[in-house]
Image (cartoon, helix red, strand yellow):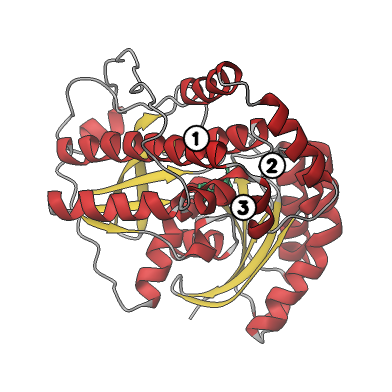
Amino acid sequence: MALILGIESSCDETAAAVVRDGEQQLSSVVASQLAHQQYGGVVPEIAAREHLRAIAPVVRKALADANVKAEDVDAIAVTQGPGLAGALLVGISYAKAMAFALDEPLIAVNHLEGHIHAVLLEQRQAGNHQVDFPVLSLVISGGHTHLYLCEQHGNAWTYELIGRTRDDAAGEAFDKVAKLLALGYPGGPVIDKLSKFGDAKAVKFAPVQIKGHPRKVSKRYAQAGNPVPQGESHDFSYSGMKTAVLRYVETNGMREAIEKRRAELAKIQPTIDDFRRITDQHTIDLVASFQRAMVEDVVAKTMAAARETSTATLLVTGGVAANSELRSCFDQAAAEEGVRVFFPSLKLSTDNAAMIAAAAYPKFLAQEFADAEMSAEAGLALR
Ligand code: KG4
Ligand code: ZN
């Protein structure tokens, strides 16, 4: 039996969790930083400082909730990247100090691998240990819209990137549109909830057009005897969608209403009911249409990749995977294609540390430990 303490601090959530054998969450504590809300986005310097304040109590609470002592832990896992360098360093320094003090191994985890293992963790926790390959994972969050073909060799997992955003990540587009329309930060949850009251056909968005790139696969992937996909890569692009919203706002004279809402919001800590009350129907229809266009594009591109790679299991994970319309649209499309699709629970869709501890478990079994030199890698790639 292995107890792994996971620590996550890559962006604006300070998180710690204790997971047994990569499949039983004993605790999961997430402290979200509210200090960024007034800026409409994450401020790196503030994030690092907030992590410094939160990390010790968050780790202490994760151990207490799991009813374990620090000495009972068998390894400390921490996010190495990708993320904000200053933010990552807080978690890494803390994890290193703990591993040194307890004389336990340190495991470096890629944040994106964590998101993928959030789904696997909960499936195992529910007793579902069998994953049918090929497995395709869509990691869709504030920083990423990445499609990975996943392979498992013994305990170890490897990942082949077959599509990614050329510009804005999907969550970034949600956040920027929310900022533009004065709907707070983060934008995804508010747009999701408001969209239920809007007409998604009210505003037409042109389909996302991107020039194809010929597909490249890694040598490792090709040499493993995998069928090398032909044709173009399965890339995404969402900055155009955000610009289309901006243009709509300008041509429909919506500025004044937006600034009025912004001023009202500044006076309160708004709930979703407040957003509904102070948002006009025209804006609600616009966000519903925006969300519909985003969801349709994400699902169509992902299912095209699933078809081409004969995907048996699709994992959709990351903050935007919490979106209710995205989930129902994927459920329907996957059922039609005969693909099994899995999402994390809402709690494990956004950043957390249970996913980091779960992703660390195969590395624990393989004794793939980090040394004292390990440091933050803001642009760490997943392979
Ligand atoms: O995975 P995450 O917590 O952090 C990153 O690794 O980026 O994802 C945060 C992103 C934000 O952009 C947020 O707006 C988006 O996930 N998000 C949503 C929803 N909940 C969170 N986007 C759409 N619909 C949601 N319900
Ligand atoms: Zn994330």
Give the residue displayed 72% in from the left and 27% down from the top: 256
Left or right: where 243 falls relative to 15: left
Quarter-of-image position of residue 369: bottom right
Label annotation for residue 362: none
Q: Which residue is mark 2?
A: 375
Q: Tag 1's secondary structure?
A: helix
The image position of residue 298, as x and y in percent, is 35, 37
Q: Tag 2's secondary structure?
A: loop
Please determine whether, in this image, residue 269 is positioned above or below residue 170: below
Q: Which residue is mark 3?
A: 276
Nearer the observer, disc 2 or disc 1? Answer: 1
107 or 128: nearer the viewer: 128
Please determine whether, in this image, residue 350 is positioned above or below residue 3: above
Q: Which residue is mark 1?
A: 286
Give the residue displayed 22% in from the left and 31% down from the top: 222
167 or 378: nearer the viewer: 167
Q: Tag 3's secondary structure?
A: helix
Q: Residue furthest top?
A: 211
Give the residue displayed 16% in from the left and 39% down from the top: 307
Quarter-of-image position of residue 199: top left
The amino acid type, in three-letter code, at marker 3 is Arg
